[in-house]
Image (cartoon, helix red, strand yellow):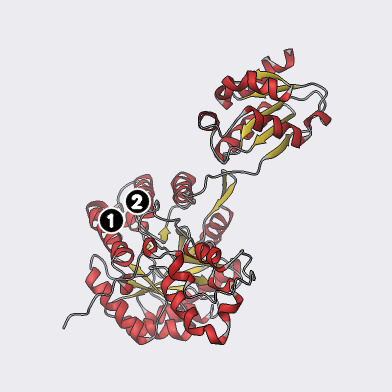
Amino acid sequence: MAEKEVKKPSIKEISPIDVYMLLPKTNCKECGEENCMAFATKLVNRELALEQCPPLLKKENEKAYKQLWEMLKPPIKEISIGAEKQTIKVGGKYVMYRHEFTYTNPTAIAIDITDEMSDEEVMERIKKTQEFSYIYIGNTLKLNMIAIRSTSNDPDKFKTTVKKVVENTTLPLILCSFDSKVLEAGLMVAPKARPLIYAATKDNWKDMAELALMYNCPLAIFAPNNIKLLRSLSKTLLEYGVKNLVLDPGTMAGEGIGDAINNFTMIRRAATKKGDELLGFPLIGTPITAWLENKDSPAEVAQWNEAYLAAILIDRYADLLILHSTEGWVLLPNVVLRQNIYTDPRKPVAVKPGMRAFGTPHENSPVMFTTNFALTYYTVASDIENAGVDSYLLVVDSEGIAVDCAVAGRKLTADKVAEAIKEAKIEEKVKHKKLIIPGKAARLSGEIEEASGWEVMVGPRDSSDIPKFLHEKWNQS
């Protein structure tokens, strides 16, 4: 008889009332909320955790806690990789589509090292992985892991390489080989690193399961282009006692890319839409396979193919990727894409309102203002810095909306600007009363002058013209 599929309620189907009925209903406020209903609402929105309700953790509420945990757990299990010093969490997704609910745990990106590389190359790749850093809208974008691959299939060589990596970085690791003896050699020199073991197949699953249990490591399952086998191996390993799994349905480059996208999509759909717990684990993609498809081509061809394959998989539910390229033009677009996908769609990306100083402004320095939409703020800030003019920038609270939209939607008004000027006590910092406003807020100029008592200078519509404006207009004012 076929297994009966039990569909778990989706996040949309869980109401605060469902959660409230299982809470202690004491309204004790120990969670920081006014009452249990408010706590229930934030639990459903994943803004708070069950553990923040002390009465729920008492022995008499153990059954209710388990029911709530089962009700609220994500369809995609969250897996931790790495030692205590530095861990990375993958998975933990609640929904298939980003607009339904915020994605959690951004796709982890690992750079590979092989056991046939020279010591110099190993150290260079560790350094590049650790030092990769890019500031984007106030966030520091970085790489996350190192994948050590056994291309020699020699346990001693693999052991030596793992030892060297462990001695020179604390980044979480992925140990890659289909030979359990090779992997065991690597695990012996990193017994507490808790790396991801890659990978179990239909031929080696038992040996890999033993390693995962012995070293308390998460285990990846590899079944290229065969979801049925992947699901079967997942069931077998769970029954064997391995609870922390990562699924690899295969990353086929070239003509197989369509199958790869289809497999990733169907697996995530089965877990989030149909409640299939055997497929409810993080997905790992290996864009590095692009290098195998382009062995005889220039490196740039493989790098390009790897870059776009990585982008597709970030967009198509991959929770972890293994890449070979360390070139900035390959990595930067993908870490920016990842950041954009994993922002909270329910909340505008905003910065804190208030006064900012650029350089060492004085009593004759220009005063400008912008909204607190993060992309607007950091673009304007960069352009002010490029101007090389000591300046003040007033960041007005527009609820995280850009200038033109904030003006149109009345989120940016003359009264708000006047209030911001007053709160920042700008009159104590400069002896003039001239305010440079964004060109896109020009229609508010008269209202701002009336509300604030300041003379308004309408600045450029595009912040890239700020340097020219300051040098030509401010110095003559």
Which residue is at 42% across, 63% downward? Answer: 93
Which of 372 and 241 lies nearest the eye of the viewer? Answer: 372
Residue 189's place in the image compared with 144, above or below, is: below
Q: List the single residue furthest toward the top.
A: 476
Q: Which is nearer the N-term, disc 2 or disc 1?
A: 1
Q: In the image, which disc is placed on residue 445?
A: none
Residue with the mark numbered 2: 312
Q: List the single residue furthest toward the left.
A: 1
Residue 148: tell me if it is visible: no
- Label 2: few (<14), some or many (≥20) within 10 Å? some
The x, y position of residue 155, in whole percent, is: 43, 78
What kind of residue is marked 2? Ile
Residue with the mark numbered 1: 261
- Label 1: few (<14), some or many (≥20) within 10 Å? many
Q: Is residue 23 left or right of residue 301?
A: right
SS at mark 2 in the image? helix
Q: Would you identify the image quadrant in which residue 396 lies?
A: top right
Residue 444's place in the image compared with 243, above or below, is: above
Residue 115's place in the image compared with 234, above or below, is: above
What kind of residue is marked 1? Ile
Image quadrant occupied by the C terminus: top right
Instruction: Answer whether labels 2 and 1 touch (C-beta < 8 Å).
Output: yes
